[in-house]
Image (cartoon, grey):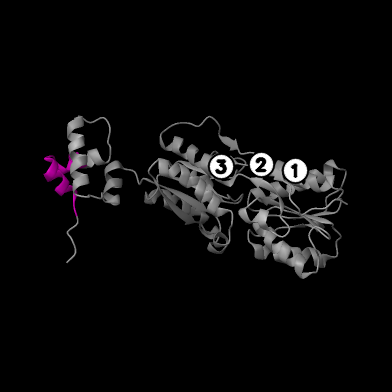
C-alpha cells in the first residue's frame, strides 16, 4: 500500500498551530505577528514529517507562480537544432537557482503571436517572462506592453518600451567583416543568421555592408542570403551563392550554427577552407574551436547575456526599476584558422 501523503494539517497538528499559520511560515510571508519560536516550531514539524508543500497551493497562498518563462518565437525544429540555446539556459539557471524559481520554456508560433503572450500572462503560470530572438513584425509585443507582467527581451526592438539585454549586432558583424578586409578580401559574401523579420538579422547584414562601404566597396545584394537559424538553411543558401556565379573569396556567416551547413556545402563543392574560401562566423558556440579548421568567429557571451537579462527580470519582479532600459553585452572577434591572407 502507498503511504498517505503528508498534508499541511499534519504539520499544523504537530506544531500546535493552524493550517493558515503553517502556510504563512512555509511561504515566508512577511509582516505578520508570528513569533520566531512559532516559525521555528513549524519548520521543525515540516522537516520531521518530510512535508513537501504543494506547488499549486503555494502559488495560491503567495499569489505568485514562483516561475519565469523563457519564450521563443521559433519553431520546435529550430529550437531542437540550436547549439546556442544550452548556453542561454545555463545563464538563466545561474540566477534562477539563487532565487528559488522554476524555469518554464514556451514557444510561440508566428500565426499566434497576436494573443499568445497575453494568454501566457493571464494564465498566471509565470511571474515574468524572457523573450528570445524577438521579431520585428511581432504584433503581440505591443499588447504585452499594456499588461502588468514583467518582461525582458533578449534582443532589441526599436520603438519597444520593454527592457532589453542585447549585443551590438551591427558593430560585431562589422568587426568580423573588417577582419576579412584586413586580410585583403574584397569580394565577400554574407549569409545571415535568420530571416529579416528577426531583429538581429538585418542588423548583422547592415554591419556587413557598413564594413564594405567604409573600405570604398559597394555592397551588392547578389552576395547576400538569409538563412533560417539551422545548418540546413546554411547549406541551402551556400549552394545558392555558389550556383549564382557571383565571385567571392570569403563569406561572413552571421551564425555558427548556420555555418555548419555552409561548411558542408563548400566541402561538397570541392572547396577548401581557408585555401579556397575564408570563413568568419558569429556566436562562438562550443564546437567552433574544434571544427576543421577551427572557426574564426565573433564571440557572443551567451551565458552572460542570459544571466544579465534574468537579473533585470528579478529587479522588475521586486518592483525595482533597472538603471538602463537597454543593456549591451560586449563581443569580440576570436581569430582561429578558417581565414587566409590574400
Label 1: element kind = helix
Q: Residue at x 18, y 61 (%)?
A: 3
Q: Real-space Cα distance between discs 1 and 3?
A: 20 Å
Q: Relative to the observer, which residue lies in front, 272 or 29?
A: 272
Q: Residues within 10 Å of mark 1 (few under 14, many from 20)?
A: many
| Residues marked 1 and 2 touching at CB (< 8 Å) | yes
Q: Which residue is mark 3?
A: 304
Quarter occupied by residue 14: top left
The residue range painted magenta reads 6-22
Quarter occupied by residue 77: bottom right
Q: Residues within 10 Å of mark 3 (few under 14, many from 20)?
A: some
Q: Position of residue 330 (x, y in %)?
A: 64, 38
Q: Is residue 109 left or right of residue 8?
A: right
Q: Real-space Cα distance between discs 1 and 2?
A: 10 Å
Q: Which residue is mark 1?
A: 175
Q: Residue at x 66, y 46 (%)?
A: 299
Q: Relative to the observer, which residue lies in front, 331 or 104?
A: 331
Q: Which residue is mark 2?
A: 331
Amino acid at each position: 500500500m502507498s503511504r498517505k501523503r503528508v498534508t499541511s494539517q499534519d504539520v499544523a497538528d504537530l506544531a500546535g498551530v493552524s493550517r493558515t499559520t503553517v502556510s504563512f511560515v512555509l511561504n515566508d510571508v512577511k509582516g505578520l505577528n508570528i513569533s520566531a519560536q512559532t516559525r521555528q516550531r513549524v519548520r521543525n514539524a515540516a522537516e520531521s514529517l518530510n512535508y513537501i508543500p504543494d506547488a499549486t497551493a503555494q502559488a495560491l497562498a503567495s499569489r505568485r507562480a514562483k516561475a519565469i518563462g523563457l519564450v521563443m518565437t521559433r519553431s520546435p525544429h529550430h529550437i531542437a537544432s540550436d547549439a546556442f540555446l544550452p548556453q542561454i539556459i545555463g545563464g538563466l539557471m545561474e540566477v534562477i537557482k539563487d532565487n528559488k524559481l522554476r524555469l518554464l520554456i514556451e514557444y510561440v508560433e508566428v500565426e499566434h503571436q497576436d494573443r499568445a503572450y497575453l494568454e501566457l500572462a493571464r494564465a498566471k503560470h509565470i511571474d515574468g517572462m524572457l523573450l528570445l530572438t524577438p521579431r520585428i513584425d511581432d504584433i503581440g509585443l505591443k499588447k504585452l506592453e499594456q499588461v502588468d507582467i514583467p518582461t525582458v527581451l533578449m534582443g532589441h526592438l526599436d520603438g519597444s518600451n520593454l527592457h532589453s539585454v542585447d549585443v551590438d549586432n551591427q558593430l560585431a558583424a562589422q568587426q568580423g567583416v573588417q577582419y576579412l578586409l584586413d586580410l585583403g578580401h574584397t569580394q565577400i559574401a554574407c549569409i545571415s543568421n535568420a530571416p529579416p523579420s528577426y531583429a538581429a538579422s538585418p542588423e548583422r547584414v547592415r554591419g556587413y555592408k557598413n564594413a564594405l562601404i567604409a573600405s570604398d566597396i559597394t555592397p551588392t545584394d547578389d552576395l547576400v542570403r538569409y538563412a533560417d537559424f539551422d545548418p540546413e538553411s546554411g547549406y541551402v543558401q551556400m549552394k545558392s551563392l555558389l550556383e549564382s556565379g557571383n565571385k567571392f573569396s570569403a563569406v561572413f556567416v552571421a551564425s555558427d550554427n548556420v555555418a555548419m551547413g555552409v561548411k558542408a556545402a563548400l566541402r561538397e563543392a570541392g572547396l577548401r577552407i581557408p585555401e579556397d574560401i575564408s570563413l568568419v562566423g558569429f556566436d562562438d558556440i562550443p564546437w567552433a574551436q574544434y571544427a576543421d579548421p577551427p572557426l574564426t568567429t565573433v564571440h557572443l557571451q551567451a551565458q552572460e547575456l542570459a544571466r544579465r537579462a534574468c537579473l533585470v527580470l528579478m529587479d522588475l519582479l521586486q518592483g525595482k526599476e533597472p538603471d538602463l532600459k537597454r543593456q549591451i553585452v560586449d563581443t569580440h572577434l576570436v581569430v582561429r584558422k578558417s581565414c587566409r591572407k590574400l
